[in-house]
Image (cartoon, rainbow, N blue to C red):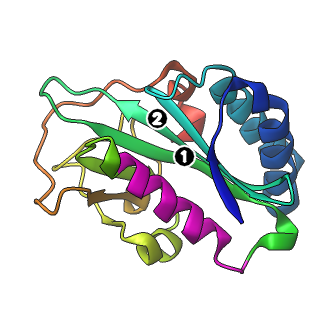
Amino acid sequence: MIHRILDKSKQKEVEELFTSVFTSSEGEKEGKLIGSLSLQLASNIDNKEIICIGAYEDETLIGCIFFTRLHFSKPILVYMLAPVAVSAEHQGKGIGQALINYGLDELKRRAANVAVTYGDPSFYSKVGFQALSENVIKAPLKLSMPFGWLGQSLTGEPIPTISKRPLCVKEFIDPVYW
């Protein structure tokens, strides 16, 4: 398996992976929603505000993750991990975990302070994420399931408390994702 930082040229490949994965696991409506989100994100990859990393096997994209920048009033470099997809035939083999760990290492190389995500605590805890109170760092929009807000320090220091909601990339400014 090879990990690559992707650019806009891979947007169709990325959209197809996310649509397929979420359709098979969550149904057609969710597949279209997350497929559309992934296409919007992939169309705006700039390797700063939106970072996309893929896992390849024999030149086939089998996994993909996005990190998007969250902006706070204080100077801190925070990225949100979302969405994540691994092709159905490659799930359960550690590919998602390896891809996320690769991405977190990339964020550390870029001197990021914190990574957050919104998802299943039992999965994301395997790659170092822990429950994160919104009293420490708020999500960009109101959460429908606050127990899924997770974070991890990338510096070894405790996650600092930041009282105001961050600004996120425009693709996530929709309550449907929260």
Question: Relative to the observer, which residue lies in front, 108 or 100?
Answer: 108
* Residue picked out by circle 1: 82
Amino acid type assigned to the residue bearing label 2 in the image: Thr
Q: Is residue 178 left or right of residue 131?
A: right
Residue 15 belongs to the span the image colors magenta: no
Kindly identify the residue that appears in the image at 29 percent across and 26 percent down: 71
- Which span of residues is magenta-colored? 92-107
Amino acid type assigned to the residue bearing label 1 in the image: Ala
How far is disc 2 from disc 1 in space, using C-alphas? Answer: 8 Å
Query: In this orientation, does residue 145 appear?
Result: no
- The image shows residue 160 at horizontal and vertical percentages of 11, 48
User: Would you identify the image quadrant in which residue 93 lies?
Assistant: bottom right
Up-down relation of residue 104 to residue 45 (above or below): below
- Magenta stretch, main secondary structure class: helix
Up-down relation of residue 22 to residue 110 (above or below): below
Q: Earlier in the sequence, mark 2 or mark 1?
A: 2
* Mark 2 vs 1: CB contact within 8 A: yes
Tag 2's secondary structure?
A: strand
Specify few, some or many for label 1: CA neighbours under 10 Å numbering under 14, 14-19, or 20 or more: some
Question: Relative to the observer, which residue lies in front, 89 or 7?
Answer: 7
Query: In this orientation, does residue 68 appear?
Result: yes
Tag 1's secondary structure?
A: strand
Specify few, some or many for label 2: CA neighbours under 10 Å numbering under 14, 14-19, or 20 or more: many
Q: Is residue 104 left or right of residue 39?
A: left
- The image shows residue 151 at horizontal and vertical percentages of 32, 57
Up-down relation of residue 162 to residue 131 (above or below): above
Kindly identify the residue that appears in the image at 72 percent across and 66 percent down: 1
Q: What's the mark number on residue 68? A: 2
